């Protein structure tokens, strides 16, 4: 795992429960059906939305069942969309990472919260924004004037707003200075990655969504979330598939509060896999506690 601050499952899960009021409402319960993998049900769907971390990969390493499942979806002729909450890199870098793992997605098949950043910039305050992310910042040209506060600790009080993109080598202790500044001077906050955590091979990371909810609690600011489970990123990804009804779209993910909630909120079917956030947990107990129920559960995609 990279040099990131880690979260325990309990910290992340309790955060999702605590901050559920900022997410879409939980849909009506369903009774999940356990399946062997997506190949068992792919004939029932015309489009598939895939998460990356926890479904296709665990950071750099590929999940072994991923490439055969990807081939099964292609063979079935279903449209594929990848919706990731990754806010660390540009689309071209995402595509290259997938290709190294054996997934040959086209550019128009990949979406993230970053896909909505240019539109969000139209309504954003002018001036220099502080960003927390990786250099080079994947900010579309002509949108935000942004500087990476994770590597250049300039005066935060002068920033027009905050972009939360990625937390590599940036932890909760670092973020306390951000909290202090935004308590003094509340300003807009845009979150390109609403995840609280991401699953790696041997641990789980701290992600920008955790910091955003913490900031909202402390400073009374309601962030603008650009990724899952919020509906706009799904609408953007499916805008060229208007002929596919929601119930013929399958969303595959490893997290109830992002992948499952986001898909079911828009009337799509969902498959929860146990290779990421939910590994080692009882998915039915988690669904019962959160009120977020997937349509299908599988050990892996």
Image: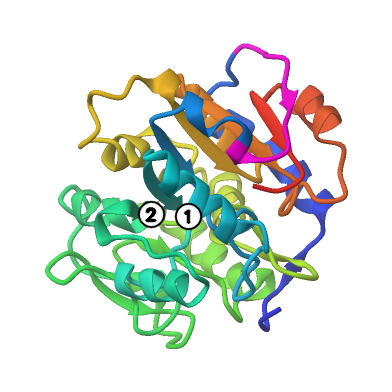
Q: Residues within 10 Å of mark 2 (few under 14, many from 20)?
A: many
Q: Whole-Å distance between the Cαs marked 2 and 1? A: 5 Å
| Residue occupying the point 65% across, 43% down | 255
Measured from the top left, where is residue 220 in percent x and y? 51, 43
User: Is residue 295 covered in magenta?
Assistant: no
Would you say residue 19 is visible in this rendering? Answer: no
Of the pair 134 and 246, the residue shown nearer to us: 246
Decide whether the magenta segment is chiefly helix, strand or loop.
loop
Q: Furthest residue to the left? A: 142
Q: Horizontally, is 283 left or right of 170 in the view? A: right
**What's the magenta region?**
28-39
Q: Horizontally, is 169 left or right of 86 in the view? A: right
In the image, residue 293 above or below residue 187: above
Q: How many labels does the image show?
A: 2
Whether pointer 2 and pointer 1 mark residues with C-beta atoms closer than 8 Å, the reply is yes
Measured from the top left, where is residue 291 in percent x and y? 71, 21
In the image, residue 215 above or below residue 179: above
| Residue occupying the point 76% across, 27% down | 287
Give the mark nearest the N terminus, 2 or 1: 1
The label number, if any, that marks residue 112 in the structure image:
2
Q: Horizontally, is 264 left or right of 297 in the view? A: left
| Residue occupying the point 27% across, 40% down | 236
Measured from the top left, where is residue 147 in percent x and y? 32, 79
Quarter assignment of residue 173: bottom right
Q: Furthest residue to the bottom? A: 152
Of the pair 88 and 79, the residue shown nearer to us: 79
Q: Name the residue under label 1.
A: 85
User: Is residue 38 covered in magenta?
Assistant: yes
- Which element type, helix, strand or loop, lies under badge 2? strand
């Amino acid at each position: 795992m990279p040099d990131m601050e880690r979260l325990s499952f309990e910290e992340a899960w309790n955060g999702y429960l605590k901050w559920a009021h900022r997410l879409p409402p939980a849909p009506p319960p369903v009774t999940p059906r356990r399946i062997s993998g997506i190949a068992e049900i792919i004939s029932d769907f015309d489009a598939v939305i895939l998460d990356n971390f926890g479904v296709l990969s665990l950071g750099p390493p590929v999940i072994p069942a991923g490439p055969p499942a990807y081939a099964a979806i292609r063979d079935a002729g279903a449209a594929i969309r990848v919706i990731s909450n990754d806010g660390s890199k540009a689309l071209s870098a995402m595509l290259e990472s997938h290709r190294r793992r054996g997934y040959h997605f086209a550019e128009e098949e990949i979406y993230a919260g970053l896909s909505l950043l240019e539109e969000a910039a139209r309504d954003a305050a002018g001036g220099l924004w502080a960003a927390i992310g990786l250099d080079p910042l994947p900010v579309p040209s002509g949108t935000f004037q942004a500087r990476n506060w994770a590597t250049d600790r300039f005066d935060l009080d002068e920033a027009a707003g905050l972009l939360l993109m990625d937390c590599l080598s940036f932890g909760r202790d670092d973020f306390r200075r951000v909290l202090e500044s935004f308590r003094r001077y509340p300003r807009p906050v845009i979150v390109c990655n609403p995840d609280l955590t991401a699953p790696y091979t041997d641990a789980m990371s701290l992600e920008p969504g955790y910091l955003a909810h913490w900031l909202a609690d402390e400073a009374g600011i309601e962030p603008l979330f650009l990724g899952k489970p919020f509906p706009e990123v799904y609408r953007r990804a499916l805008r060229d598939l208007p002929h596919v009804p929601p119930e013929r779209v399958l969303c595959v993910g490893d997290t109830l509060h992002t992948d499952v909630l986001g898909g079911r909120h828009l009337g799509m079917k969902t498959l929860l896999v146990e290779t990421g956030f939910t590994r080692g947990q009882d998915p039915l107990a988690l669904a019962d506690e959160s009120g977020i129920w997937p349509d299908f559960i599988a050990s892996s995609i």
